[in-house]
Each structure stands twice: as structure tokens, then as C-alpha cells.
Amino acid sequence: MKKKRIITLKDPKLRKIRKNLRELLLKAFSERLSEVRSKKDKIRENPDLNYYEKKEKLIELQSIIQDLTLAKNGAPLSCSTCKRIDIDLVYNPVFEEWYCEECYEFNSQGHKDWFP
């Protein structure tokens, strides 16, 4: 997206569904992240692998962690500042992240160019 965008829901039932879906997706993200970190720990502790094999596998896992984090930050799951999930979000095309309307307004007061 290249423009500021606001996603607003007025129906309380839809808001509840959105909140529950966000919780589910964040939980799945946390579980996957924990899984990958656990694999990293096992690789570090594995005495059968030499330094270069460990390094190669750890770089691969770090890439997965980075991809997961970028996907989470780019998705409208929670405010990038206050982390609330039960509210309407505003997309900031400069940072390619989502903010609640309050945080977006607060941040735009001091940084007009970064928060159009």
C-alpha cells in the first residue's frame, strides 16, 4: 500500500471476531517463533556439528525469524506502538506498519513527514 489507510468496524460482533482472529494469529506467530528459537538452541548445543555447519543452520533459522517478524509487523494485527489489538488501525506507508488512531495522531504531531 502506498497511502495512509484506516480500517474501521462499527458492528460490535465484527469487532469481536476481528479481535479473536488477531489473538489467534498472534498466538500462532508466538508458537512458531518459539519453535524456531528452540531449534536454534538445539543446534548450538549439538556437539556433532562443526562451527561452519552450526553457523549455516543458524543463519537459515535467523532468516525464518526475520521473515516471521516482518510478516507480523506488516499485518494489521496490533498497534506497532502500544500493541493493542481491540481497536481500529491506521496504516503508515512510510514505515509500512499499523498504528491505532491515538498513537498515529500522537506520533504525527512531532513528525509530520513520517506520519502523513
Image (tube, grey):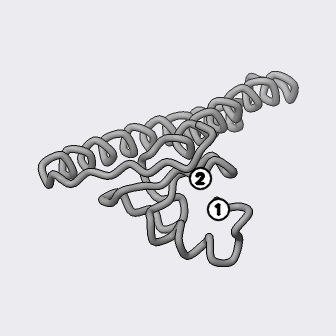
- Image quadrant for the C terminus? bottom right
What is the x, y in percent for residue 60?
Answer: 72, 26
Question: Which label number is shown at residue 115?
Answer: 1
Q: Which residue is mark 2?
A: 92
In the shown orientation, is residue 48 left or right of residue 71? right
Residue at horizontal 26 percent and vertical 51 percent from the top: 9
- Image quadrant for the N terminus? top right
- Per the image, label 2 sits on a secondary structure element best described as strand
**Residue 69 quadrant:** top right
Labels 2 and 1 touching (C-beta < 8 A):
yes
Real-space Cα separation, disc 2 to disc 1, in angstroms: 6 Å
- Per the image, label 1 sits on a secondary structure element best described as loop
Residue at horizontal 53 percent and vertical 71 percent from the top: 105
How packed is label 2: few (under 14 Cα within 10 Å), some, or many (20 or more)? many
Residue at horizontal 69 percent and vertical 68 percent from the top: 112
Q: Mark 1: which amino acid?
A: Phe
Residue at horizontal 42 percent and vertical 55 percent from the top: 89
